[in-house]
Amino acid sequence: MKTTSQKKSNRLPQESKLVVPQAQTPETPKQDSRLPIDTEARKHNRTLPTEKVLALLQQQDRRLWELAEVVGKWIWVSFSESPAPTVRQTLAQLGFHWNRTRQAWQHPCGQFRLSSAGDPHEKYPTYNPADVTTN
């Protein structure tokens, strides 16, 4: 039997060259822009009743108190734009948390619940403390 010799090559065929990506600079992690808070004070503040949280809110920043809305026993604070970091720090320190679904800062006022079905405005009475006049 007659065989033909073929030259063996250690190289890959032209169309299957390996493409080695160039060195990429590692992505810099997103910096945390949150200001520090006292976590123990925050935990304590989350258990306070509605009236005490409203008093703290009015004492800390009257503008936040004017934006506050009481929904049932919870307090919500909503903004048309993202608030300044110092405002977010104040809210977090007082025990508020951001609710992405409702686009509001919420305080449970000691009434911890998982998410509710539907809009709480339809289930619970609501009012703005700044609109209520005291005699």
Image (cartoon, grey):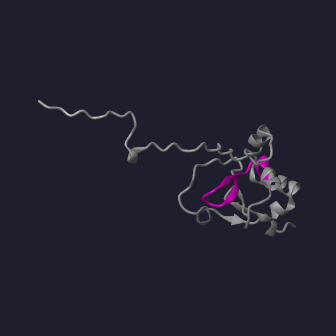
Please, which residue is most extreme toward the top here?
A: 1
Q: Which residues are magenta?
A: 91-106
Q: From the viewer's perspective, tell me whether residue 54 is left or right of residue 108.
A: right
Q: Does residue 113 belong to the magenta stretch?
A: no
Where in the figure is residue 101, as x and y percent of width and height? 60, 58
Residue drawn 75% across the image and 49% down it: 49
Estimate the x, y position of residue 64 in percent, counting from the top left.
81, 60
Q: Residue furthest left?
A: 1
Image location (x, y in percent) of residue 1: 11, 30
27 versus 128 height, above or below: above
Query: Residue at 56% across / 55% down in the picture?
Result: 116
Q: Where on the picture, by quarter, is residue 40?
A: top right
Whether residue 10 is visible here, answered yes or no, is yes
Instruction: Tell me the quarter of the image containing the C terminus.
Output: bottom right
Which is more toward the observer, 71 or 81? 81
Location of residue 22 by image quarter: top right
Residue in the foreground of this view, choosing between 64 and 14:
14
The image quadrant of residue 4 is top left
Query: Residue 99: within the magenta?
Result: yes
Task: Please state the horizontal and vertical placement of residue 50, each as a whole percent of the image.
Answer: 75, 53
Question: Image check: 58 left or right of 92?
Answer: right
